[in-house]
Amino acid sequence: MPAERAHRRLRDPLTGVWNRAGFESQSRRLIAPGATVLAMDLDHFKQINDRHGHLAGDTVLRALAQLASAEIASRGGEFGRLGGDEFLAILPAWRAPYAQACAQQIHEACRHHKDGVPHWTMSVGLSQIEPGETDLRDAMLRADRALYCAKVDGRDKVIA
């Protein structure tokens, strides 16, 4: 049972995906030049909470986590929630040629997701781990910058 409790501590209680610590522990096996990092953020999430209530906001977070984690897992990657409405994924290097398409599929699925939740969109920033990088830090920073560019450029976009 201690191992089960430890495993639960690595999961986000709301969405069931990896939390920051869980994501970092699981993604270590994927850190290699060419692996792709995806930084994802819900657009105007505060407005969803303000207009529809926090329960609706929680439902949107769970829907995003379900859609994105399934897509990322099907490609051998890891997906987690960093906090709030911020999510992160890493795809293995051998999936790099498909990373943009994967991000676009998640993006489109979110835009068209109905299932009793308010309309919502997301922005995604991508980057790759470069030769010589041994952790996610720099790639995460680049993915976050790309995400910020998507937000500044009108949101609801995928930018590499």
Image (spheres, helix red, strand yellow):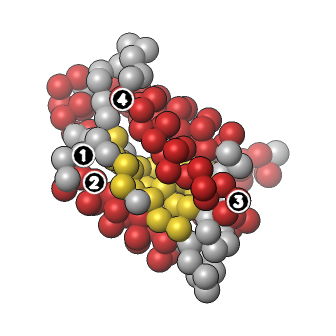
> Which residue is under mark 4?
111
Decide which of tag 1 and tag 2 comes sooner along the chain.
2
Q: Quadrant of the N terminus?
A: top right
Mark 3 and 4 residues: CB-CB less than 8 Å, in contact? no
> Dot 3: within a 10 Å radius of its alpha carbon, few (fewer than 14), some, or many (20 or more) residues?
some
Residue shown at 70% from the left, 59% from the top = 94
Q: Residue at x 50, y 50 (%)?
A: 100
Q: Is residue 157 left or right of residue 71?
A: left
Upstream in the sequence, badge 1 or badge 4? 4
Neighbour class for label 2 at 10 Å: few (<14), some, many (≥20)? many
According to the picture, the residue beneath numbered tag 3 turns out to be 94
Q: Earlier in the sequence, mark 2 or mark 4?
A: 4
Looking at the rendered structure, the kind of residue marked 4 is Arg
Circle 2 is placed at which residue position? 150
What residue did someone put label 1 on?
Answer: 155
- In the picture, which quadrant includes the C terminus? bottom left
Q: Which amino acid is tagged 2?
A: Ala
Q: Secondary structure at mark 3?
A: helix
Q: Which mark is residue 58?
A: none
Can residue 59 be seen by looking at this rendering?
A: yes
Measured as percent of width and height from the top left, residue 114 is found at: 39, 17
Q: Residue at x 32, y 45 (%)?
A: 157
Q: Is residue 55 visible?
A: no
Please indicate whether residue 33 sits to the left or right of residue 81 in the image.
right
Q: What amino acid is found at the position of numbered circle 3 in the picture?
A: Trp
Q: CA distance from mark 2 to mark 4?
A: 15 Å
Coordinates of residue 102 in the picture (x, y in percent): 54, 44
Label 2 near label 1: C-beta < 8 Å?
Answer: yes
Mark 3 vs 4, N-terminal side: 3
